[in-house]
Image (cartoon, helix red, strand yellow):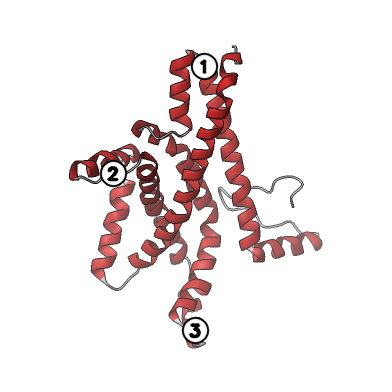
Amino acid sequence: MDFTDLAPYAPVFLNGAWLTLKMTALAIVLGVAVGVLVAFARRSRNRAVARACSAYVEAVRNTPFLVQIFLLYFGLASFGVRMPTFAAAVLAMVINIGAYSAEIIRAGLESIPKGQIEAAECLGLSKWRIRWHVMLQPSIEKVYPALTSQFLLMMQASAMASQISAEELTAIANTVQSTTFRSLETYLVVAALYLVLSLFIKLLAWAGGEYFFRRRRVIRQALKAAGKKPPPRAPGELAEPRGMA
C-alpha cells in the first residue's frame, strides 16, 4: 500500500469530514426537537394528531434512508422545489432521526410511573413544568444510551448523501479514488476518519450525559466513596473515558 498519492488530498478529506460532522450535528439538534414533539403528540388525546404522528413514524422507520433522500431531492424538484444538496441531506436526516428518536423518547415517557405525574399535579405544577421536569428529563436520562447509538448510526448513514452529490466524506472519497485509482488506500483513510468521528461523538455524548444528568454522577460518586460498586450500566451506555472520571 502506498498513501503518498493521497497526501495532496488531505485538506479535501478534512473538509469532507467537517461537512459530515456539521450535517450530523444539525440533524441531531433539530431531529431530537422533532422527536420530543412527536413523542408527546403520540400520547395526545386528540386521535387525529396521534394517528398522524404514528403514520409519520411508521413511514420513516419502514422505508430506506436512501429513498427518503431521493424523495426530498428529486421528488420535490419535479414540483419545482429545488433544494441545495446540503439542505436536502440535512432535512432527510432530521426527518429520519426525528422518527427514530420519537419512538425512543416515547418508550422513556411510558416508563414514568403515573403516580409520579399525579403527585406533581397535586402539588399544583403546570402542565409544562410536569412535562419538562417530571416526564421529559427522567425519560431522556433513561433512554440516553439508545439515543446516542442512534446519533452514531445517523452519522454513518450520512454517507448516503453522496448519492445526491453532497460533498461529505464518502463523496470526497469517491472523487479521490476516481482520480488517484488508489481504492484500497482511499477507503482505508475514509474508514479511519469515520472511526475518529464516531469516537468524537461518543466523547461528546459522554460529556453531555455527565453534565445534564448530574444526579447519576452524584450517586455513582457516593457509592464509590462508600466502597460499594456502582450500579451496572444500561445496555449501550457509554463507558467513562479513562482519566475523565
The residue located at (43%, 66%) in the rendering is 110
Between 80 and 109, the one lying in front of the other is 80
Q: Which residue carries the number 3 mark? A: 125
Quadrant assignment for the N terminus = top right
Q: Amino acid at mark 2?
A: Leu
Q: Amino acid at mark 3?
A: Leu
Q: Nearer the viewer, mark 2 or mark 3?
A: 2
Upstream in the sequence, badge 2 or badge 3?
A: 2
The image quarter in which residue 62 lies? top left
Q: Which residue carries the number 1 mark? A: 184
Q: Amino acid at mark 1?
A: Leu
The image quarter in which residue 9 lies? top right
| x, y percent for residue 38 | 36, 62
The residue located at (63%, 46%) in the rendering is 203
Q: Is residue 17 left or right of residue 36?
A: right
| x, y percent for residue 97 | 41, 50
| x, y percent for residue 5 | 57, 14
The CA span between labels 2 and 3 is 42 Å
The CA span between labels 3 and 1 is 60 Å
Count of numbered marks:
3
Q: Secondary structure at mark 3?
A: loop
The CA span between labels 1 and 2 is 32 Å
Q: Which residue carries the number 2 mark? A: 72
Q: Which numbered marker is on residue 118?
A: none
In the image, residue 178 sits, relative to residue 24, either above or below, namely: above
